[in-house]
Image: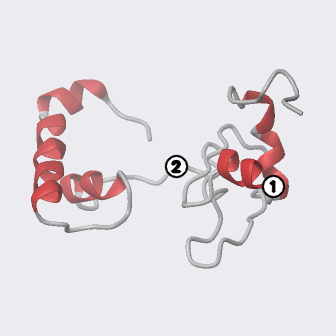
Amino acid sequence: MVIDLDRWRVGMYTEQIKRWMEVQKRVRIYELGSLPPFLLVFGGRIAGVDHRWNQHGLGGDNYRGLCRDLHPGPVSLLHWSGKGKPWARLDRGRPCPLDALWSPYDLWRPTFDLE
């Protein structure tokens, strides 16, 4: 997500998003993480970001947990959107092939063997 902070402040978008989050706390109106309040506030007044900037979907298929591949060509940001997070799959011993890209940044790796 790329945001023009001057327009963000003038539009008071933080307050609008917070209001939708308060509604969500009282009455469940959506199921999908943090994106719906933004969609409710911006209602289609957004522009897509080319996949070279955001390789999303590495969290896999939310229904069957399938692994996904990278888009062809260069990628700037790896985004494990979806339910499948690399740290959880690595901990369970059932990683997707691209989860290995996350492994070097995992701060919860034991530094010694407990056995």
Q: Position of residue 13 (x, y in %)?
A: 17, 38
Contact check, label 1 and label 2, Cβ < 8 Å: no
Q: Position of residue 63 (x, y in %)?
A: 57, 78
Compared across the picture, whether 23 is left or right of 62 comes to left
Point out the frontmost of discs 1 and 2. Answer: 1
Tag shown at residue 49 = 2
Which secondary structure lies at badge 1?
Answer: loop
Label 1, label 2: how many angstroms apart (C-alpha)?
33 Å
Q: Which amino acid, mark 2?
A: Val
Q: Is residue 77 above or below residue 107?
A: below
Label 1, on which residue?
93
Depth order, front residue of 16/44: 16
Depth order, front residue of 25/42: 25
Residue 94 lies in quadrant: bottom right
Q: In which quarter of the image is the C terminus?
A: top right
Compared across the picture, whether 22 is left or right of 83 comes to left
Q: Residue at x 77, y 56 (%)?
A: 70
